[in-house]
């Protein structure tokens, strides 16, 4: 699957293929940033940048300007990788160099930039707010699109003086689709590639998520005064246990949440858990649950009076996907076993777009396969033409 994405990027850029071997390991620490922990040990140059958003958050952005010293490739166009929910930029480097998109793109000569949203462990807090303050966590994916992604893209665009290739996974695609409705953002983008594209969530089939929605877990946590969601904390683990215990089979918790992943490397779970999951805000979860309950792709719902004060209307405004210009090339990959990016919801997204994106459908793939599959190798170049049930 990553091979197909790489094929599209290379087709647009006109570059060839080569392979590499995997050496090095994460050391299980956040000291020194993502570059020091996940990239430089593999022999790649990597530099840490800090981007201040318009609302004061300090985001970590990593830059891999070229491949390892033993692979001499000229400078290519900038590509920006945006992670999903409860993930950080480390997700793009979690497998071998042959299977991790961050390394693959660097080896193909792309100028690789990695985004990390507010609240992740790689980012650097806020100019005035402490992470212990409720106000620090007063945001949802809407803010991640309006501020984090927009400001990080502008940073890369201004540093490189070039339009950016944008790649997003899961929540990274929600952010991308919302941000691309803004002319000031879309004009900085050369092409957008969306893995497990999400704008609508009305047809998700995840047993774990649907149980949490049915129990109104989001509202219970709000009533209890929570504002941060951290599933590495004792309370976060207790929440997971309470949803599973005696009510559903969570022996494969990942599958209960994301759908059955055909090609996920289970032998590396302990390795992944050195960094994942990253924290997020409760408001973000509330917003996502609103989308599931209402089947809408809209701004945060503050209630009738809150909406009237915030938006001047009783209902939150919907994001208009038709505002994404027809001239922007879009590529989307989705899977038959994905319990979060459901085929019906993907179809709704496609109906509202002006353009006709290139599609890649993999029947056996689940949500996590698109970023952590054992089959994500350069040698697996799948046909990137329009395929599958949405044909």
Image: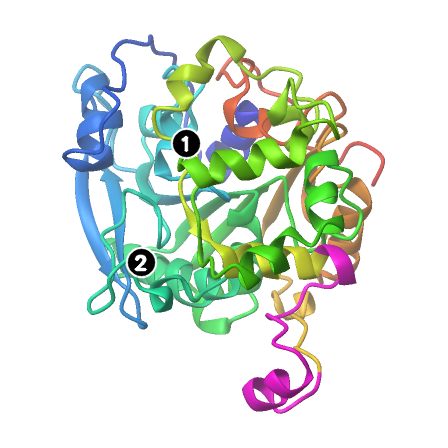
Check disc 2 and report its element: helix, strand or loop.
helix
- Quadrant location, the N terminus: top right
Residue 316 picture location, percent across and down: 66, 77
Residue 263 picture location, percent across and down: 61, 15
Callout 2 touching callout 1 (CB < 8 Å): no
Please tell me which residue is depicted at 17% across the width and 39% down the height of the picture: 47
Q: Quadrant of residue 251?
A: top right
Residue under circle 2?
157
Residue 77 higher or lower than 29, as above or below = below
Residue 104 picture location, percent across and down: 39, 24
Left or right, residue 93 beside residue 129: right
Residue 222 higher or lower than 356, as above or below = below
Q: Is residue 307 one of those drawn in magenta? A: yes
Residue 386 higher or lower than 173, as above or below = above
Specify few, some or many for label 1: CA neighbours under 10 Å numbering under 14, 14-19, or 20 or more.
some
Left or right, residue 79 beside residue 242: left
Kindly tell me whether residue 384 is visible in this rendering: no
Check disc 1 and report its element: helix, strand or loop.
loop
Please tell me which residue is depicted at 47% across the width and 57% down the height of the picture: 226
Specify few, some or many for label 2: CA neighbours under 10 Å numbering under 14, 14-19, or 20 or more.
some
The colour scheme used to paint the residues is: rainbow
Left or right, residue 131 beside residue 197: left
Q: Quadrant of residue 337?
A: top right
- Seen from the viewer's position, the closer of residues 336 and 20 is 336
Q: Earlier in the sequence, mark 2 or mark 1?
A: 2
Magenta residues, as a range?
292-314
Rendered image: mark on residue 276: 1
- Seen from the viewer's position, the closer of residues 32 and 323 is 32
Kindly tell me whether residue 253 is visible in this rendering: yes
- Quadrant location, the C terminus: top right
- Seen from the viewer's position, the closer of residues 107 and 34 is 34
Closer to the eye: label 2 or 1: 1
């Amino acid at each position: 699957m990553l091979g197909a994405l790489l094929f599209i990027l290379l087709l647009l850029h006109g570059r060839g293929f080569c392979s590499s071997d995997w050496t090095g390991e994460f050391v299980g620490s956040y000291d020194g940033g993502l570059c020091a922990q996940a990239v430089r040990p593999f022999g790649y140059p990597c530099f840490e940048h800090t981007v201040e958003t318009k609302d004061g958050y300090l985001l970590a952005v990593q830059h891999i300007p070229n491949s390892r010293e033993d692979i001499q490739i000229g400078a290519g166009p900038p590509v920006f990788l945006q992670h999903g929910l409860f993930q950080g930029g480390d997700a793009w480097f979690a497998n071998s160099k042959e299977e991790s998109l961050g390394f693959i793109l660097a080896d193909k000569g792309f100028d690789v930039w990695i985004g990390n949203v507010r609240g992740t462990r790689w980012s650097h807090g806020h100019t005035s707010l402490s992470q212990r303050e409720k106000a620090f966590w007063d945001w949802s994916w809407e803010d991640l699109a309006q501020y984090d992604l927009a400001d990080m893209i502008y940073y890369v665009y201004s540093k490189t003086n070039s339009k950016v290739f944008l790649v997003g996974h899961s929540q990274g695609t929600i952010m991308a689709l919302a941000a691309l409705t803004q002319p000031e953002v879309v004009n900085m983008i050369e092409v957008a590639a969306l893995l497990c594209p999400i704008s609508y969530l009305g047809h998700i089939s995840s047993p774990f998520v649907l149980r949490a929605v049915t129990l109104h877990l989001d509202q219970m946590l709000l009533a209890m005064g929570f504002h941060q969601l951290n599933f590495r904390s004792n309370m976060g683990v207790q929440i997971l246990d309470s949803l599973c215990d005696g009510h559903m089979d969570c022996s494969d918790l990942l599958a209960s949440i994301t759908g059955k992943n055909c090609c996920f490397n289970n032998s590396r779970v302990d390795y992944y858990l050195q960094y994942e999951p990253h924290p997020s805000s409760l408001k973000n979860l509330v917003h996502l649950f609103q989308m599931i309950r209402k089947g809408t792709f809209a701004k945060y719902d503050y209630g009738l009076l809150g909406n009237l004060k915030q938006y001047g209307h009783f209902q939150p405004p919907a994001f208009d996907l038709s505002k994404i210009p027809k001239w922007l090339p879009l590529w989307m990959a989705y899977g038959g076993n994905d319990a979060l990016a459901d085929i019906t919801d993907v179809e709704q997204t496609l109906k509202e777009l002006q353009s006709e994106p290139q599609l890649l459908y993999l029947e056996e793939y689940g949500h996590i396969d698109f970023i952590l599959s054992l089959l994500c190798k350069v040698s697996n170049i799948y046909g990137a033409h329009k395929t599958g049930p949405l044909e």
